[in-house]
Amino acid sequence: MHDELRKAVCEANRQLHEQKLVIGSWGNVSGMDRSAGIIAIKPSGVAYDELTPDKMVLLDADGKIIAGTLKPSSDTPTHLELYRNFKAVGGICHTHSPNATAWAQACKEIPCFGTTHADQFYGAVPVTDSLTDEQIEGNYELNTGRVIVRRFAGLDPMQMQAVLVANHGPFTWGHSPAGAVESMAVLEQIAAMAFGTLTIEPGQKPIGRALLEKHYLRKHGKNAYYGQTRKRTDANTDAHGRKP
Amino acid sequence: MHDELRKAVCEANRQLHEQKLVIGSWGNVSGMDRSAGIIAIKPSGVAYDELTPDKMVLLDADGKIIAGTLKPSSDTPTHLELYRNFKAVGGICHTHSPNATAWAQACKEIPCFGTTHADQFYGAVPVTDSLTDEQIEGNYELNTGRVIVRRFAGLDPMQMQAVLVANHGPFTWGHSPAGAVESMAVLEQIAAMAFGTLTIEPGQKPIGRALLEKHYLRKHGKNAYYGQTRKRTDANTDAHGRKP
Amino acid sequence: MHDELRKAVCEANRQLHEQKLVIGSWGNVSGMDRSAGIIAIKPSGVAYDELTPDKMVLLDADGKIIAGTLKPSSDTPTHLELYRNFKAVGGICHTHSPNATAWAQACKEIPCFGTTHADQFYGAVPVTDSLTDEQIEGNYELNTGRVIVRRFAGLDPMQMQAVLVANHGPFTWGHSPAGAVESMAVLEQIAAMAFGTLTIEPGQKPIGRALLEKHYLRKHGKNAYYGQTRKRTDANTDAHGRKP
Amino acid sequence: MHDELRKAVCEANRQLHEQKLVIGSWGNVSGMDRSAGIIAIKPSGVAYDELTPDKMVLLDADGKIIAGTLKPSSDTPTHLELYRNFKAVGGICHTHSPNATAWAQACKEIPCFGTTHADQFYGAVPVTDSLTDEQIEGNYELNTGRVIVRRFAGLDPMQMQAVLVANHGPFTWGHSPAGAVESMAVLEQIAAMAFGTLTIEPGQKPIGRALLEKHYLRKHGKNAYYGQTRKRTDANTDAHGRKP
């Protein structure tokens, strides 16, 4: 039942380890089959090399367990809140990857300092508010999801597939579990680069709107021309700068 | 004799190398069988890939050698002092892992800047006083143990399984040799993250009490709900934030 | 057709991944056969471990596709502009390697702080101007090539086989695709070292002219004496400092 | 002829690559058979994985080539000057390892901030004067050796088996080629740690004399008690701090 979903979620979790985005069992990936309304998520505290598709826990969007004998990740309520509110999301990832976490712990958004960032994220990677004591002592993991959702008022989560939870660490997402992991891998790299940039030039400003849009939109959206899925033309220039 | 203890200590020492927490022979792990009153420890200056269970040195808590033909780690008296004073400890680890050592050399405790830290350590990771010249010139390794024990007056060593010895480096511990190594691996990561956090935001404050307790206690203690050892319920939320 | 060129370009692209200069598909290498006027370049968005020589795209210097079924790298017009203007270049490389990119994002040239740098690059590694909004919104990749060419007015591109595109990242080149990758690997290292140097000593000045020339010229140019391609003499000293 | 020396030097050079202390062909190790007056050194610009014992170049202390068909490392005159002046040295190593080089480029000695450093180096790792233009334009590699020797006036090179050449990088040495590489590996680690320490605590002072002597002398010299080569006693403490 839901074999493909389980398999995709299992493989995405293993990729966290493979790509050195986690140590121990510090991260989790989930995926959602929107047509079935079913979410698969990593079991809590299980080592990545022991994960198999049948160990993935299946839930509905309200958190009711549908299948699986293990406990789901303790971060499950955060994932569910995001699936309920970000309707196009098909996969979610959470880690404590070191560079992104350093920014989250500093409670600072990551400014968009260059095209590496702009290729993936359409602006500064936002940071949430810190949770209040009441939010922490109440339904903590759900409230974590809520501060993320609140932070995205006015933002399109498919154009900004990452957030830093203040004092905590990153969550990323995408159209699929693999897409969520890819967002995490890029986030970790641009967090490191931004750290370097600010150390070299403490007052550095983010890139301008034109460069952000150029890079984000050449990879994403209807006029994208990166990769193999779009129509090929000759390389779009000649020796005099005319487009063919 | 004490085969399981030797094996566990040998494997934990090899993990130091495997997890890149040491270069050369710069670290050691010991374990104690509390019921037998026996401690096993790495021999001094032996390479990790040459370690076998039978090379582990067995001692009693007073340092008398019980079995083994090699010399024990020169840090043995520090380990013994901790076993004598921290009665629940079953394994101890010492390394010069680079990020934790940078903090130890700076003679600064590592503030708890986030949930990665709080998941493992119940507050700032303490740093000892520097040893006096007299303590250094006297029974140095024993006195190292003593400054650690003194620093833990009023602290529960099972809730803070790590310390930075000023001008030196980290010691960690746990219920077992493997647990001590796990504490070390986490310490090294949170030391790197805290370094990053302070560089991004020099005046950053530690997280509040509520978040520290939430994260520490969801993994440790009687109401913990992380991992597979506790009773499973449906994910503890629904779309309206009610706990089931 | 052009099998050797395809093979060299394919292998150079795979080296980017091998030498950890890229994650994902964030980089590309091209090569030019000057006698044939043919350029081979990585296809856009294809994973490095799926690259084979026959997947390389062949173009002429005006960007007309000669052979290959895939789309060329979206950065192709930048490469072409460099081949058209830097007449001795036989290979070009572009990555977002983290340390070099941190400098590019800071819009700072990398000062020549030591002999490691001077062995490869004959002075500070230059940074381009930021592109104007008009340049970005026009023929962006071509204009990227143009700001590089403009920055090299008065510089010999064969003595400075690297540039930082402001707000973006590094391009390097050489006599061959492999040479371009080697320049990139060295650039990434000296970017990291320069970062360290400035953190240790914020006001540090670049090395003097004499040391720069000594190191650059002992490896490059007609009087070079590094490596195995020059005439061997006894080691050029004796106990009294006389040259033999 | 001199097979053991060639083999030891070859293996030590390969270790540079294995331990990630070099990229490209950026480093070299030599060894000296003092009784024969013969030095073996890496050939210039040859890749580490192509090195075999028979490719090592043999010279006498005046630089006359005794055997081997390849050109010796261009740094050979520096090595020779050190062998002529540091009479107990049996192996010398030079790299551009990134952390040590960052300090060398900053023209700063590495203060002894902790026991990791003190275990290997008996005080701050010294930095040479910058070479004058005349020294650079003259017999450069020999003069590099000379500024090192001059910097060691009053220092015992066997108690300080490392130096930073200003604007350049580290040289290390030891009783053997392997010992020289070990000094380099430790230097690289303590350079990274010192960098971290100063970032965390910019005004941090070096450790005191007592701790330096304790750690250096417990590993080196006649009263050393680290490792397996000394007489074993029971661990040197009891529950009351009395030495057995």
Image (spheres, coloured by chain):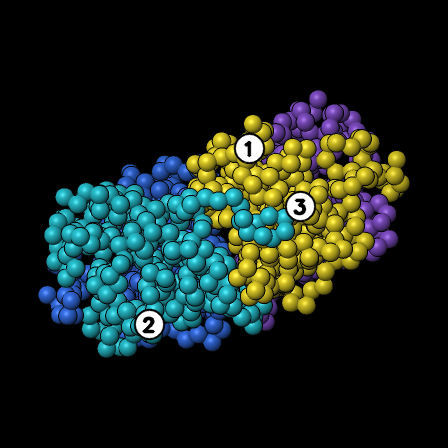
Chain colours: A yellow, B cyan, C purple, D blue
Tell me if C110 is positioned left or right of B25 in this view.
right
Which residue is depicted at the point 12% across and 49% down? B67
For residue B154, the mark is 2
Cα–Cα gap, marks 2 and 1: 48 Å
- Left or right, D24 with respect to A176, comes to left
Asked which secondary structure carries label 1, the reply is helix
Would residue B60 be found to the left or right of residue D11 on screen?
left
Q: CA distance from mark 3 to mark 1?
A: 20 Å
Mark 3 burial class by Cα count in 10 Å: few <14, some 14-19, many 20+:
some
The residue under label 3 is: A84
CB atoms of marks 3 and 2 within 8 Å: no
Q: Residue at x 75, y 47 (%)?
A: A216
Q: Quadrant of residue A220?
A: top right
Q: Chain of mark 1?
A: A
- Which of the 4 quarters of the picture holds residue C173? top right
Q: Position of residue B29 (x, y in %)?
A: 28, 53
Asked if residue B142 shows in the view, the reply is yes
Residue at 52% from the left image edge and 44% from the top image edge: B234
- Viewer-nearest of discs 3 and 1: 3
Q: Decide which of C9, A222 is in the foreground and name it.
A: A222
